[in-house]
Structures are given as C-alpha cells and as structure tokens.
Image: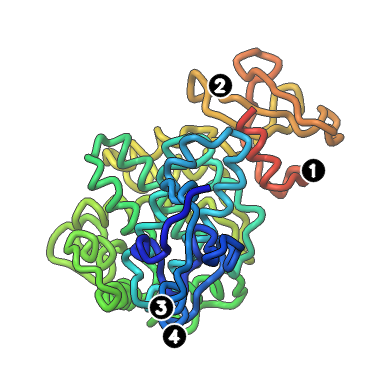
Amino acid sequence: MQFSQLATVKHRLAVGQPLPFNVRNADHTLLLARGQVVETFDQMEALFTRGALVDLAELRAPTDRIREAPPEELPRLWHQCMDRVGQTLQSCTQEGFGQALDDVTGPVQALIERDSDLAIFQVLRQDGNRHTQYGVTHSIHTAITAFLVAQRLGWDEDSVQKVFKVALTMNVSMLELQGQLAEQATPVTAEQRAQILSHPMRSVEMLQLAGVSDRDWLDGVAHHHVAPDGSGYPALDREPNDFAALVRRADIYTAKLSPRTTRSAMAADRAGRAMFMYDPGNSMTAALVKEFGVYPPGCFVKLVSGETAVVVKRGPSVVTPLVAALTTASGTALSDPQPRDTSKREHAIAGVVGGDAVPVRIAPEKLMTLALA
C-alpha cells in the first residue's frame, strides 16, 4: 500500500461529517475507520499534526468507485449514500456545509446515472423509512426526481446538478417538523402552519449563513411553493425560475407517493394521472410523467394471471415493464420471486396495487436486488 499525508487531502474532510476514508497512524495501523466523525476542529488539527496517513487507493473519487462497482454492490451503495446525504442535510448550520454537500451529492448523482431504474426504485419503495425520517427522505426523493426530469428535458449539466441541490435543500429549515407532521393524526396547529408558510425563506437564510451565494439556487429554494401565476408562498409578482418550477412539481409528485400515518401512498398510475390533471400541457409535468411511466420501478401490480408482482425495470413500452412475481395466483408467497414477461397476454398487468394489498413483505434491499437481475 502507498500512503499520503492526511493534511494533503484536508479539503475532503469536514468537522462533524463522516470520514470518507480510513485514517492511519504513522506506522500504518488503523487510527480512525471510514465513517467515523471528527467532532471538533482541534481534533482535526491534531490528526494533521501527528502526521496521520491515508491509503492512496482509498483516495479514488467516490463517483469512480460507483461507476466501477459490480451491480450487486449497488443496493449497499445506495443505502450508504442516502444516509450520508441525510446526515449532511441535518448539519446545514455547521461550517463547511457547502463542501460537504458537494461531497455527498456527487455519489448519489453517479448512482442515478449508473442505473436510473434503480434510482426510481428508491422513490417508490419507501417501506423501510420511518415517518420520523420523512423530511430527509422526501428531500432526497424529490432531488432524484428533479435530476431525472431535468436530464429528460435536456438541461445542461450545471443546471441538472443545481436543481438537484435546490430540491435537497428546499426544506432544511423544517426537516424535524416534516417528520412530526408525517406521524401526526391531528390537524396542523396555527404554530405549525406559520412554520410551514415561512420555511422557504428560513431555508434560504440557513443556506446563506452556511455560505451558499448562488442566486439561482437560493431563488429556487425561496420560490419552490410558488405557482406559475405567482400565487403560493411567498407570493411573487412573476413566475418563479425554472429550478423552483421543476422542484415544485417533483415535490408534489413524490409527496403523493409517500405514505403517512393518516394515509397510504398514492398508487403510481394515479399519481401520474393526478399530475396531468393538475398541470395539463406543462412540459415539465409531461417529462416527469414520461420519465416515471405508468408502472415505474418499485410499484406493485396485479397480473392477469392473478399473481402479485413488483416492477423492477421499465420495459420496451410504457405498459410492458419487467416485473417479478411475489405471489401465486392464489396469493401464496413465492419463496423466490419469479420474472414475468408482461408483453405476454397471461402475464399482462391488470392494475397497480398499493403496498398494503401485498400479502408478502420483502426487505427493500432484496427488492432492489430483484431490480438488478
């Protein structure tokens, strides 16, 4: 192994954030494992002073590791990357947030580009998410959606990456409140309503304090609840910028797909139709619905055969995705999910079913593995 002084890569480190690689003593023994957190600036400086080292092999960019990873590692990488994004969003007030956000968003974008079906799968299959995590996971799912739709619309790379960050940070001032609301069975209180209405501008203030100065980014966050006619909150006398406009639609769509204590997630086909009815003729909405399709990866469907299946990949047409049967026609769980060709009459899709109607429970990680088959 070849080593480099930790001080030479200090730009990749941030106090309060998980270490992106193992840190070793001068004798090459392990000092701190990847993922551990250096809590203070003094502790960080002490590492540099003592001559801590890092293995050069671990300095490969995370995006390179994702592009080169075997398919079976992708579920684990998704889990790790989404955890890191969540931790970063929850530390928005800490110094170095901008750099930390760059460090964690690059790998997620690489995962999206590596397998867009698996990316959509993250948005649809939210069974493992506690309601208390709703604020973080919803922001990530909105960002994935906005990223994919921006690419479909032909936006340039810089704009695609920027809309991803707008979506991620739109709700940094109310992540905890969103978790509370997702579990709350009673109506929103007056105090909660006030926090909801003020959260776009409070999020902007937090981003500015964290060093974000990009005007398009800040305006996108400020106006992501503003309608095309300028209504919404905070009200404008003009249309919001394209970043806010796309994030607003991705926000609405992914919220429909998210379960809460008081309601189940909306079926994917119904969510798509609702978006068309809500926003007829809009190119962003049309691109969003086309990107996800009628039967997006991760949704559960009933086949003409009577079997219940999960969509694992988009297929040659919008109505013939690749699916894996989870039950027999009588509803008995299959020990091993079986692939089905929905272009064949006997395995055609009869309709979408909600997760509550699926009699078998499969861990999200296993479902993701099916999507890689």
Q: Are marks 3 and 1 in contact (CB under 8 Å)?
A: no
Q: Which mark is residue 33?
A: none
Residue 135 visible (yes or no): no
Q: Amino acid at mark 4?
A: Ala
Above-or-below relation of 58 to 66: below
* Quarter of the image where one finds residue 166: bottom left
Q: What's the CA distance linking mark 3 and mark 1?
A: 52 Å
Q: Which residue is mark 3?
A: 45
Q: What's the CA distance linking mark 3 and mark 4?
A: 46 Å
Closer to the camera in the image, 118 or 81: 81
Q: Quadrant of the C terminus?
A: top right
- Tell me the SS state at disc 2: loop
Task: Tell me which label, 1 or 2, sits earlier in the chain.
Answer: 2
Q: What's the CA distance linking mark 3 and mark 2?
A: 57 Å
Q: How many marks?
A: 4
Closer to the camera in the image, 176 or 29: 29
Q: Amino acid at mark 2?
A: Thr
Q: Which residue is mark 1?
A: 360
Report crowding for label 4: few under 14, some 14 to 19, many 20 or more residues within 10 A (C-alpha).
Answer: few
Q: Amino acid at mark 1?
A: Val
Task: Tell me which label, 4 or 1, sits earlier in the chain.
Answer: 4
- Tell me the SS state at disc 3: helix
Q: Which residue is mark 4?
A: 190
* Residue drawn at the location 62% of the way across and 74% of the way down: 185
* Quarter of the image where one finds residue 199: bottom left
Q: Are marks 3 and 2 in contact (CB under 8 Å)?
A: no
Q: Which mark is residue 320?
A: 2
